[in-house]
Image (cartoon, rainbow, N blue to C red):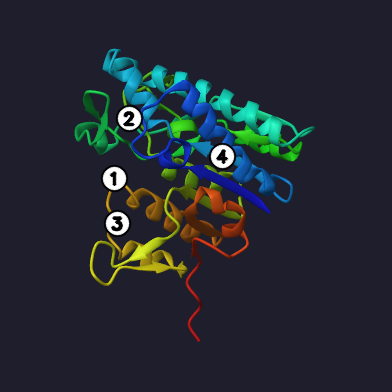
Amino acid sequence: MRIVIALGGNALLHRGRHPDPALERADVVRVATAIAPLAHEHDLVVTHGNEPQLSRLAAEAPAGALDLLGAQTQGMIGSLLVCTLRDALPGRRVAAVLTHTLVSADDPAFTRPSTRVGRTTVPAPRPERVLEADTVRALLDLGTVAVCAGGGGIPVAVDDTGALRGVPAVVDKDLAAAVLAEELKADFLLLLTDVPNVYADYGTPRQRPLSDATPAELRRGHYPAATMGPKTRAAALFVERTGGLAAIGHLDAAHEIVHGRSGTLVRPELPAV
């Protein structure tokens, strides 16, 4: 099975913890330990968040350099993940790919900045495609565990001359993972965070964990934009477009989630009878 894993920021760095190199290394070791068993059984692509690291860099740099700061965080986190995954998977090929995500220069998001990064609010345009998807596919065919699409990918758009240019924006990492998973013809999109399930009737006295859901049920849930909303939208999008499976759950239960013993499974609608 081909699995795309999307590591949430709270899976990669404990919630509320300030980014620190020593702590980040310890957290990445935990990530590698959790997902390495899946690499023994499946083709694996690992994507990751970068919000704490990007915000730290953006607070000290001009907003126009945001695409390059995204590249910097991709390289830093990618290096940590590659080294720890190599240690956890002796003899296995592991490679990080610097990844660009194409967005439309006409995306309405550019007129409505919505995402806080550092000391400013920036646009979050919709990801259209991941430009290095073919390269990632080739690596998978060689048995390589690929680390890519960090922070949703470096956002680029086509300018009036037809050239690619970086743009001062961020791409939602979960939606980018869903787009990449579709391009790679993945069977499973696994969104890992620091909670065990999606919850129905979230924030009310009727709140309860969901063991499975359809895309329509997730879309009716109106989950918070700052937490579970992007994950439920990404899972719904992937399942609707591909007919594959998605799941959302706790990093430490990654293996159990794929085998149906934990998390929230997102499945296609059952056909009417």
- Closer to the camera, 98 or 56? 56
Q: Which mark is residue 31?
A: 4
Amino acid, disc 1: Ala
Q: Seen in the image, is 159 located left or right of residue 135?
A: left
Q: Is residue 94 above or below residue 220?
A: above
Residue bearing the label numbered 3: 223
Nearer the observer: mark 1 or 4; the answer is 4
Looking at the image, tell me whether mark 3 or mark 2 is earlier in sequence order: 2
In primary-sequence order, the first of circles 2 and 4 is 4
Give the CA distance from mark 1 to mark 4.
22 Å
Q: Which residue is mark 1?
A: 226
Q: Residue at x 40, y 18 (%)?
A: 69
| Marked residue nearer the N-terminal end (4 or 3) | 4
Of the numbered discs 2 and 1, the one sitting upstream in the chain is 2
Inter-mark Cα distance, 3 to 2 = 28 Å
Q: Which mark is residue 105?
A: 2
- The answer to whether residue 148 is seen in the rendering is no
How packed is label 2: few (under 14 Cα within 10 Å), some, or many (20 or more)? some
For image coordinates 66% across by 43% down, the residue present is 36
Q: Residue 273 placed where, x, y %?
A: 50, 87
